[in-house]
Each structure stands twice: as structure tokens, then as C-alpha cells.
Image: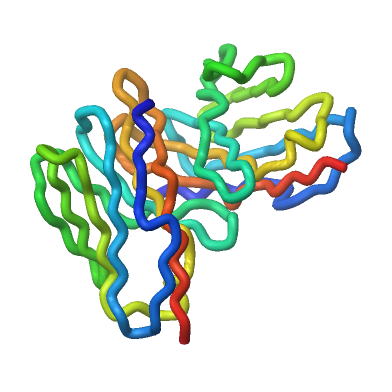
Amino acid sequence: SQQGEEDPQALSIQEGENATMNCSYKTSINNLQWYRQNSGRGLVHLILIRSNEREKHSGRLRVTLDTSKKSSSLLITASRAADTASYFCASPRRGANNLFFGTGTRLTVIP
Amino acid sequence: SAVISQKPSRDICQRGTSLTIQCQVDSQVTMMFWYRQQPGQSLTLIATANQGSEATYESGFVIDKFPISRPNLTFSTLTVSNMSPEDSSIYLCSGKVGGDTEAFFGQGTRLTVV
């Protein structure tokens, strides 16, 4: 399966702390994407990093990609209660256009 | 970016009945997909909705159980047929403009079968 594995499965932190989530995948990819899902609702795209990029920033988000280790990490700095959600990594399926999703990390930010 | 309106947002259905979920995109997207998310799990692709032709189903999903329509580039429906409690899940539609671009999602339909 191309599905990514994420760790930790669940993470609980205090507001203001940083949160780091990791994603590992099995096959070569063109890009890796991160999504947020609030309370079992629709997913919102956060950031896309291409295979020739090593790091990318967007506001309080920092994503890294290590293609040699087939892994990526998402760092949320200065977390807020509103960041409480599930976070998924995803990559395009080889030979198709849909995304394979990782197992997800459930983040809880305590006010 | 595209906005996808999905309805209903939730429903409670009797076993043996069917439910049709609709997704409307505010702009043309090349590709549309339907996913299922079982409680506490990740997303699993049901099928790719093809405009004007039969959907492409993933292993474990069949047209008789999950008929899909996509009459044009901005609209698609998924029907969950002859429902059983095991069909209780969140169903999500998604659209993409290109192969290596991000995906847009509807707000999901939380289905409970009793």
C-alpha cells in the first residue's frame, strides 16, 4: 500500500507550544501534501511540497521533506486552540490522480 | 481555489434504504473523487467520478452498491444503496484541477445507518 504512516497518532500540547507531526511513505512521490480536518468535516489543504524541495513555510507552518528517508514532517509553531484538528499527509497515487492519505495525527491544543 | 458544496451534511437512515449525496463545484474541475472515512480512520477512495461515463471503482467497491453520476464538470452524486450499519461513515467528495495539484473537499456527509 502506498498509504503513509503518521506519528504520533495523537498529540496533546499546551497553547503556545510547537507541534510536530511526522509522515512516512513507501513509494517515490512527485509531491507530498498536508491537510487539516476539523471534527470529521471536510479536509482543508494546508501546504504542498514538491519532491525537489526540502523545506517550505506558510505562516506558522513549516514542512520538510526527505525523499531519501521517504518522510515528511509538519511543524506548527506557537499553537492555538483553533489548531485542534486531525492532520493528514497525502501523496498522489502513481499512475492516477487521486491522493493516498496517511493514517492521521489527532492534535489537541489545550488553552 | 474551488469551493465544493456537499449535501446533506448528515443523515440517519434505516437499513435497506438508499441515500444520494450531491456535490456541486463552483468552478470546473478536471477530476472528482469520492472517499469514505470510517470512524477514527483515514480516507479510503471509493471511486473516480468520470464525466459522462461510468465511474472507476477501487477494489472492494462496486457500482451496484455505490452508483456514481457525473453529468458535467461541476456536479456529481454518490448513492449508498441498500444500506447496512456497516455503511455508517463520513462520505467526502473531492475535486482537483490537475494531477499534481492540491485537492478540494466538500464538507462531508456523516451517515448513520440504524
Q: Is residue A96 above or below residue B26?
A: above
Q: Place residue A60 in its image quadrant.
A: bottom left
User: Horizontal placement of B25 versus B99: left or right?
Assistant: right
Q: Residue B29's spot in the image, x, y percent?
A: 44, 34
Rendered position, B64 above or below A69 = above
The one of B23 and A16 positioned closer to us in this rendering: A16
Question: Residue A76, percent across and down?
Answer: 29, 69
Query: Is residue A38 left or right of A54 when viewed as pictured?
Result: right
Colour scheme: rainbow
Q: Is residue A69 above or below residue B47?
A: below
Where, by quadrant of the figure, is residue B62 drawn?
A: top right
Specify the quadrant that holds the C terminus of chain B.
Answer: top right
The count of marks equals 0
Between A105 and A52, the one lying in front of the other is A105
Q: Residue at x 32, y 32 (%)?
A: A92
Residue A52 appears at what percent x and percent y?
Answer: 9, 40
The answer to whether residue A48 is left or right of residue B114 is left
Q: Residue at x 21, y 57 (%)?
A: A63
The location of residue A54, given as percent across then percent down, is: 10, 50
Asked if residue A76 lies left or right of residue A9, the reply is left
Residue at image position (75%, 34%) is B86
Of residue B15 and residue B68, the one placed in the foreground of this image is B15
Residue in front for this viewpoint, A39 or A48 = A39
Residue in the image at 61% along x and 23% along y: B71
Q: In the picture shown, does residue B81 fall above or below B12?
A: above
